[in-house]
């Protein structure tokens, strides 16, 4: 419960993001949770050049040597998309322009 609101949520106003109710049958408990904004500050995403943009590159399973080259160029395998993610400039340097997928790839690299 929100302590500022003495059990209600009225005073939270714009800070209230979400209210969830969870039920635990085995424990015979019902929980109510809230998500509140505790800080807000200006932010703008970093500007990336096309060279820094991550792209998906198709490399066949049997192209072991090419996979090694992609790894050496800091490429990471993305199992969800079945592509190698790497910087655009490094893909071009390896001559892989024609293998770049026409899809949006995440900006967060898989570990």
Image (cartoon, grey):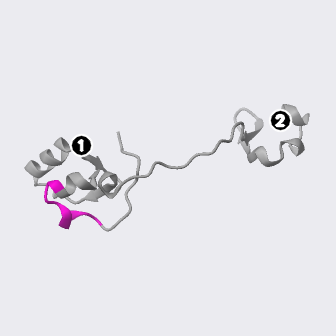
Q: Quadrant of the C terminus?
A: top left
96 relative position to 54: left or right: left
> Which residue is nearer to you in this view: 16 or 1?
16
Q: How far apart are labels 1 and 2 at the CA level?
A: 46 Å
Residue underneath mark 1 = 74
108 relative position to 74: left or right: right
Secondary structure under tag 2 reads loop
Residue 90 numbered tag: none
Classify mark 2: residues with Cα within 10 Å, few (<14), some (14-19) or many (20+): some
Residue underneath mark 2 = 2
> Which residue is nearer to you in this view: 76 or 38?
38
Residue lying furthest right: 6
> Which residue is nearer to you in this view: 78 or 44?
44
Question: Looking at the image, is 33 positioned above or below residue 48?
Answer: above
Look at 10% across and 54% down and name the residue there: 63
Which residue range is magenta in the image?
93-101
Look at 73% across and 40% down and name the residue there: 36
Residue 17 image offset from top left, x and y in percent: 73, 47
30 relative position to 108: left or right: right
Number of numbered markers? 2
Secondary structure under tag 1 reads loop
Q: Which label sits in the foreground, 1 or 2?
A: 1
Look at 40% across and 51% down and name the residue there: 107
Question: Looking at the image, is 87 positioned above or below residue 5?
Answer: below
């Amino acid at each position: 419960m929100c302590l500022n609101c003495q059990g209600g949520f009225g005073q939270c106003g714009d800070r209230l993001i979400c209210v969830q109710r969870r039920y635990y049958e085995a424990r015979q408990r019902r929980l109510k949770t809230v998500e509140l904004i505790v800080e807000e500050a200006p932010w703008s995403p970093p500007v990336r050049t096309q060279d820094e943009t991550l792209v998906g590159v198709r490399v066949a399973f049997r192209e072991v040597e090419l996979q090694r080259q992609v790894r050496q160029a800091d490429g990471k395998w993305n199992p969800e998309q079945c592509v190698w993610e790497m910087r655009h400039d490094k893909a071009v340097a390896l001559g892989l322009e024609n293998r770049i997928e026409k899809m949006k790839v995440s900006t967060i690299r898989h570990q």
